[in-house]
Image (cartoon, rainbow, N blue to C red):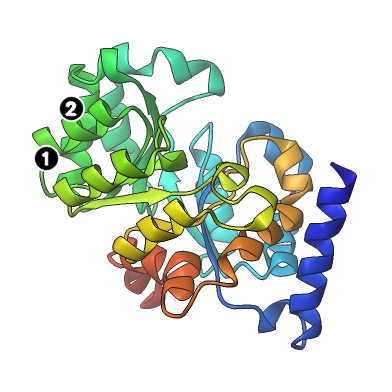
Amino acid sequence: MMLRVLALLLALGGLLAAGAGADSLPPMIDAHAHYSAPDAAAFTPAEVIARLDAAGVRRQVVTSSPPQLSQQLYLHAPDRVIPLLGVYASDLHKGNWVHDAGLPARVAAQLEDGAWAGIGELHLFARDARQPVFTQLVRLAAARRLVVMIHGDAEVVEQAFAVAPGVRVLWAHLGTEPRPDLLDAMLARFPQLWIDTSVRDERIAPGGALLAEWRALFERHPERFVVAVDTFSVNRWQHYETEVAQIRQWVDPLPLPLKGNLLHDNAARLFDSFLPQRARR
């Protein structure tokens, strides 16, 4: 593990040596992050932004439990944070939120109080894909042109588009079955689907080298994948720069514009209805 970390830091050091520092790295949007209660206890908003700066991350898509924390982070740095409305009061809510009949009304009210780019991350699996609470949240997101971040099976993504064909979905972690053939078929069926690579770096790029089947998939769908870290724990925040360096290591050899799409442009397009609105404020 120590050798792996050292290799990543050396790779990042080489990239930094080629320019003036983190600002010289290709721009990156981290498309999946959390700033929940344990993270907020460990890191102030200013310290979070300092970690983005050190890693050369221009913007970050952030959700939280409770949801107010991501909004606080956004208010601290509105040009750096793209806030998603988390629906969990705490992480203990992950397993039962879809059975909370009052949740859609509370989410609708929370959306009126703050600036939000999306809803999620929603943890949901095939057996509960047709639950009315999920249906209502997806329709709410579609009506407000918000992105829905889904952590779940393919059946959940299919159901989201069945109830709201125009909704934009960000599917976390290359899905629960990260197989190029499955993702290829899903992307062909659903033009409003984007997929993030978070926590799958070692699977798709062992040792930092992207596997041929994954490179081929990214090349077939160059505008549909986004890179992400997923700061699901305080430990991920503590090692944030190393995690970003791991992503940059496998992305860097790719040709332009694919590299730019993965690191930045696809996420910018996904959240285009939010970013320009904030820039005008």
**Disc ID at residue 175:** none
Q: Is residue 132 left or right of residue 51?
A: left
Q: Where, by quadrant of the figure, is residue 105 drawn?
A: top left
Measured as percent of width and height from the top left, residue 198 is found at 53, 46
Can you tell which quarter of the image residue 99 is in? top left
Q: Residue at x 53, y 32 (%)?
A: 65
Residue 66: give x, y in percent of width and height. Answer: 52, 32
Farthest residue toward the front?
A: 212
SS at circle 2: helix
Q: Residues within 10 Å of mark 1 (few under 14, many from 20)?
A: some
Q: Which mark is residue 135?
A: 2
Nearest the camera: 8 or 101? 8
- Residue 80, placed above or below residue 176: below
Q: How many marks?
A: 2
**Which residue: 49% across, 24% down?**
89
Q: Earlier in the sequence, mark 1 or mark 2?
A: 2
Residue 58 lies left or right of residue 183; in this view the side is: right
Q: Which residue is mark 1?
A: 164
Quarter of the rendering occupied by the C terminus: bottom left
Image location (x, y in percent) of residue 156: 26, 28
Q: Which amino acid, by three-letter code, is at mark 2?
A: Thr
Q: Could you tell me how far apart the alpha carbons at marks 1 and 2 are, in whole angstroms? A: 9 Å
Q: Secondary structure at mark 1?
A: loop
Question: What's the amino acid at mark 1?
Answer: Ala
- Tell me if residue 144 comes above or below residue 255 in the rendering: above
x, y percent for residue 106: 31, 28
